């Protein structure tokens, strides 16, 4: 399998899965995609129905990474997707399934269920891909005798998923910047209680944007970046996207009895990474009816799927909401879908994303391209704080099930796209304990806390406070990579 950039650079060059694994953007600023999507045959689909999660992951990933020996890949997926790692389940007996399907009920003739993706170590769906990434990174670095220092900024979910994936991994260090005293007690404890010597929590005296600016400043110092072997694990990483394809297959099998049926998925979306994986599953031939993109008040994506207009927001127009992991102003993986929508024309993609930089967006309505969105199964909707609170309360009362704020956005929007006879699977992207404030508002009770997390906030914490100063962060990194 060869990988190409959405903006056309490197056509005719060879990029394997391992080549692009540790990198971010392609050198022309585009995103990597396979030169064509591998297709799944009816025979394969029939055989995959009964596989364990780990072996299903092996079968799917193998189609995208033929440069990794099959035995090695199988060992990596079996080591990653274990009941021990994904142990924070609602029902103990479901742990072996890794991503159990929780049926809520039938609404408007459509079976409605939640695909639990948040049973991993940080209680958010990002663990599904990030845990594999940790093992893939360690494997690839060891093979080439290299090391990597991951630098990142986080306001919560991504940073902790990265730390729990990379802790104790050989050849890898993580330097994670977070805003000092600005995260919830739970999120702070989740990250800062890690005692692994290869994990460095840096509490910056500033806000999240300051942390991000420091990461940018350090990354723009190319000499420093090369010398210190600095890398990232952000949501455009191809391996993260493709690892997420697996649970669409798993969810499909759990929601159906035979491969003749079709299923719709609703995906609480921010950077379009999760739902992009759904798009890829559909392109591979999984019988997906609709891919429902659910946004919060930051509705860049909903606007596009309703109107064909993609208009990125400025920082000042980006709202801080009670589903904060979806508070984005531009969707960093969206370009991958646009590439497919435009019939894989890199020249036009380049032009459109130049327009994003220069004019703040583009309009596909006039050109007629938007009409094809339907063929890809995409529809959308948005949800706001009141919807979220109402939905959390309604799902709790009706189905005795507590859901988090992001999942609530998903359920709210899913209900607007139900079709009789077509199972609707909402991806559960986090557990309620992570967003306790809104749970208390909706239900007047404390969120459920998985057993492994009791007393988390009173564990000893390990972190370094640094001023809002890129130079000081560089000095800290340099001093700890020797
Ligand atoms: C990251 C995240 C999202 C958004 O996922 P994308 O892949 O960025 O679209 C939704 N919900 C939760 C809880 C998240 O952590």
Image (tube, grey):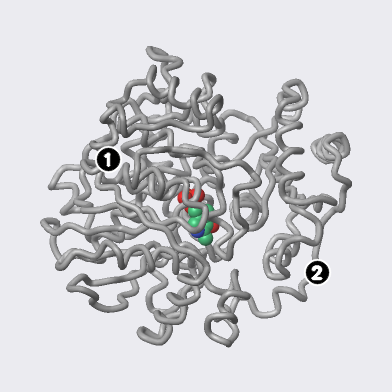
Query: Is residue 103 shown above or below 148?
Result: below
Residue 126 visible somewhere in the drawing:
no
Would residue 441 be found to the left or right of residue 466 on screen? left
Would residue 1 be found to the left or right of residue 289 on screen? right
In the image, the residue with mark 1 has its CB under 8 Å from the nearest atom of ligand 1: no
Any mark on residue 460, and which? 2
Q: At which x and y percent is residue 232?
A: 62, 38
- Circle 1 residue: 373
Q: At which x and y percent is residue 364?
A: 34, 32
Q: Residues within 10 Å of mark 2 (few under 14, many from 20)?
A: few
Tag 1 secondary structure: helix
Front: mark 2 or 1: 1
Quadrant where the C terminus is found in the figure: top right
Tag 2 secondary structure: loop
| Residue at image location 31% in from the left, 34% down from the top | 365
Query: Is residue 203 shown above or below 346?
Result: below
């Amino acid at each position: 399998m060869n990988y190409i950039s959405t903006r056309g650079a490197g056509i005719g060059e060879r990029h394997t899965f391992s080549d692009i694994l540790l990198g971010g953007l392609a050198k022309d600023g585009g995103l990597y995609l396979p030169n064509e999507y591998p297709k799944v045959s009816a025979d394969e689909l029939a055989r995959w129905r009964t596989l364990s999660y780990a072996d299903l992951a092996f079968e799917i990933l193998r189609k995208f990474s033929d440069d990794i020996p099959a035995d090695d890949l199988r060992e990596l997926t079996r080591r990653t997707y274990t009941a021990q790692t994904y142990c924070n389940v609602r029902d103990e007996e479901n742990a072996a399934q890794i991503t159990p399907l929780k049926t809520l009920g039938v609404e408007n003739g459509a079976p409605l269920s939640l695909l639990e993706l948040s049973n991993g170590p940080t209680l958010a769906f990002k663990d599904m891909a990030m845990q594999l990434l940790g093992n893939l990174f360690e494997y690839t670095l060891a093979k080439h005798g290299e090391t990597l220092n991951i630098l990142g900024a986080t306001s919560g979910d991504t940073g902790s998923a990265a730390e729990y994936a990379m802790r104790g991994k050989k050849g890898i260090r993580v330097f994670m910047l977070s805003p000092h005293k600005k995260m919830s007690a739970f999120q702070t404890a989740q990250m800062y209680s890690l005692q692994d010597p290869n994990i460095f929590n840096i509490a910056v005296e500033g806000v999240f944007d300051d942390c991000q600016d420091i990461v940018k400043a350090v990354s723009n110092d190319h000499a420093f970046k090369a010398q210190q072997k600095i890398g990232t694990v952000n949501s455009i990483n191809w391996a993260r996207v493709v690892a997420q394809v697996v649970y669409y297959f798993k969810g499909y099998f759990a929601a159906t009895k035979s491969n003749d049926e079709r299923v719709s998925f609703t995906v609480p979306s921010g950077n379009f990474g999760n739902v992009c994986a759904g798009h890829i599953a559909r392109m591979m031939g999984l019988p997906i009816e609709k891919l429902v993109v659910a946004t919060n008040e930051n509705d860049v994506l909903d606007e596009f799927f309703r109107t064909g207009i993609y208009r990125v927001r400025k920082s000042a127009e980006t709202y801080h909401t009670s589903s904060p992991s979806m508070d984005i102003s531009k969707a960093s993986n969206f370009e991958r879908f646009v590439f497919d929508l435009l019939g894989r024309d890199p020249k036009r993609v380049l032009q459109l994303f130049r327009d994003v930089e220069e004019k703040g967006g583009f309009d596909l309505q006039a050109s007629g391209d938007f009409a094809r969105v339907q063929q890809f199964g995409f529809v959308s909707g948005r949800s706001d704080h009141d919807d979220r609170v109402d939905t959390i309360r309604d799902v709790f009362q009706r189905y005795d099930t507590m859901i988090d704020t992001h999942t609530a956005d998903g359920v709210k929007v899913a209900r607007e796209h139900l079709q009789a006879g077509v199972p609707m699977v909402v991806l559960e992207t986090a557990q309620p304990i992570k967003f306790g404030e809104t749970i208390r508002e909706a239900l007047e009770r404390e969120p459920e806390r998985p057993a492994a997390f009791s007393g988390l906030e009173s564990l000893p914490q390990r972190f370094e406070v640094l001023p809002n100063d890129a130079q000081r962060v560089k000095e800290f990194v340099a001093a700890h990579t020797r």
